[in-house]
Structure formats: structure tokens, C-alpha cells
Amino acid sequence: MDTQQPNNPLHGIKLADILEYLVEYYGWEVLGEKIKINSFNSNPSIKSSLTFLRKTPWAREKVEQLYLKTKFK
């Protein structure tokens, strides 16, 4: 069954794609200033950041909101 989510702008977008977009757009330094989490400020990598974001709902929410604000402004 194919479930549609017309009111969810993030439907079908992977967290890894969101993070890669933000890193390319802002860079790690600016991203770490905008969202204060260690995985963006201390030896940042996509892999460690994804691990943290998948386990931490408040941080994931901040990343998703920044993505929406940046991508669809």
C-alpha cells in the first residue's frame, strides 16, 4: 500500500540527504553555530552526525526545520 503524506514536506527525503545538503550549503562551522551539538562542532562527520541525530529527536527536529527554512525560503 502506498501511503501519501501531502502535508509533510519531508516525506521521501532521507536524513542523510538533508544533512549533506546543509553541510554543503553552510559548512560544518556555520552549521555548528546554528545548531549547537557536538557532532557538528567537534571532529564533525556525516556518519557521526547521523548516528546522533537518529537517537536524539530534538536535534533531528532542529536539523529538519533548518533544512525546510533553507531549502524553501
Image (cartoon, rainbow, N blue to C red):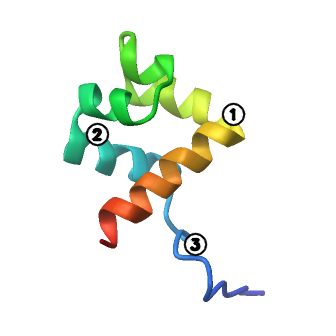
At which x and y percent is residue 28? 28, 28
Q: Earlier in the sequence, mark 2 or mark 3?
A: 3
49 on left or right of 55 = left
For the C terminus, which image quadrant? Answer: bottom left
- Helix, strand or loop at label 3? It is loop
Which residue ends up furthest to the right in the rendered image? 1
**Which type of secondary structure does the marked residue at label 2 adopt?**
helix
Identify the disc placed on residue 56. 1
Q: Residues within 10 Å of mark 2 (few under 14, many from 20)?
A: some
For label 1, count other residues whose C-alpha is less than 10 Å away and answer few (under 14), some (14-19) or many (20+): few
User: How far is mark 2 from mark 1, CA to CA?
Assistant: 19 Å
- At label 2, which amino acid type do we have? Val
Q: Front-most of 39 and 30?
A: 30
| Cα distance between the residues tagged 2 and 3 | 20 Å
Is there a contact, CB below 8 Å, between mark 2 and mark 3? Answer: no
Q: Is residue 58 above or below residue 44?
A: below
Q: From the top left corner, tell me how far across and down residue 22 is, in percent.
A: 32, 46
Density class for disc 3 (Cα within 10 Å; few <14, some 14-19, many ≥20) is few
Of discs 1 and 3, which sits in the foreground?
1
Q: Which residue is mark 2?
A: 23
Q: Which residue is identified by label 3? A: 11
Please indicate whether residue 70 sits to the left or right of residue 18 in the image: left
- In three-dimensional space, the C-alpha distance between marks 1 and 3, rounded to whole angstroms, equals 19 Å
Q: Residue furthest top?
A: 42
